[in-house]
Image (tube, rainbow, N blue to C red):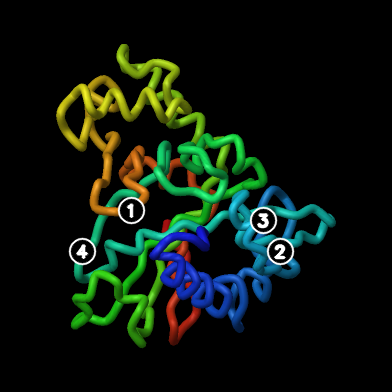
Amino acid sequence: MYGNRQDSLGEEKVNEFLREHLYGGKYGLVKTRYSLNDSKVVRYEQVTEKIRQSMGEDMILHMDDKSTIVIDEKAALYYPTPRKPIDTFAFELKTNINIHGNNQGWLFGKDYTNTDYYLANWITLPDDVEDKFWWQKDIRIISVESMLLNKKRVQDFVRGAFSYEKNLFGKYDEPDYLERFMNTIGSDSYRFRDFYKGKGIRLMRNLELPEQPINIVIDKVYLKKIAELHIKSYFNKAPKKIY
């Protein structure tokens, strides 16, 4: 989460929902002692210090073998179902705004080394919600679909995609190069033509947001293949795993 972005309140709302209905609650990961890396979750710890959040720590899972797992929560805040559902997730490679004073995105940035896993979240709101900045209103989240993704596996996937593109080879962690590349192609979207036959992965630049990020956008179908956990949590019933 980022405390200096306009969507930080939305991220806090999603985090509150996950604490109550995914990590905690009667049927959450702690109560069911969810197993990860051959160890079971015994408790969770919310990270509230802004400096730690800025380095990729939102939630700590404490396991029964005394190990800890650091999770960085990410949410598709601007694309809630049913208003604007999506079957992709964006991983940040370049940004104009971060607390570290550089333009490195969180996927490969040198200041985000604390993260072990990302929790990618897709949000469902009531049918009548149309406000783009819904988190500024008193709106209840209906459900959240989540994928727990090992950071290194995501990075390796992205490295693989870049290795297929002659003009992008090895440039996945060079935000200045990516900016020049997007300016050169004259478009805010570039499809990886030679990776998975050009389907399901692309570079996108969003000029509508203050941070004007360049993201690598990946289809859910590929993320499912590397997800450690795919689950949907609800405000009024037990979470349900997605297979």
1 horizontally vs 136: left or right:
right
The disc placed on residue 41 is 2
- Residue type highlighted by circle 2: Val
Mark 1 and mark 2 lie on one chain; the one further toward the N terminus is: 2
Front of the two marks 2 and 4: 4
Most foreground residue, 10 or 100: 100
Front of the two marks 1 and 2: 1
Quadrant in which the C terminus appears: bottom left
* Residue for point 32% across, 46% down: 212
The residue labelled by disc 1 is 210
> Contact (CB < 8 A) between labels 3 and 1?
no
Is label 4 in a helix, a strand or a loop? loop
Residue 13 in picture, x, y percent from top left: 46, 75
- Residue type highlighted by circle 3: Arg
Mark 3 and mark 1 lie on one chain; the one further toward the N terminus is: 3
Residue 175: quarter of image: top left
Mark 4 and mark 3 lie on one chain; the one further toward the N terminus is: 3
* Residue for point 60% across, 71% down: 23
Mark 2 and mark 3 lie on one chain; the one further toward the N terminus is: 2
* Residue for point 52% across, 63% down: 3
Is label 2 in a helix, a strand or a loop? strand
Q: Is residue 201 above or below residue 136?
A: above
Front of the two marks 4 and 1: 1
Q: Residues within 10 Å of mark 3 (few under 14, many from 20)?
A: some
- Residue type highlighted by circle 1: Pro
The residue labelled by disc 3 is 52
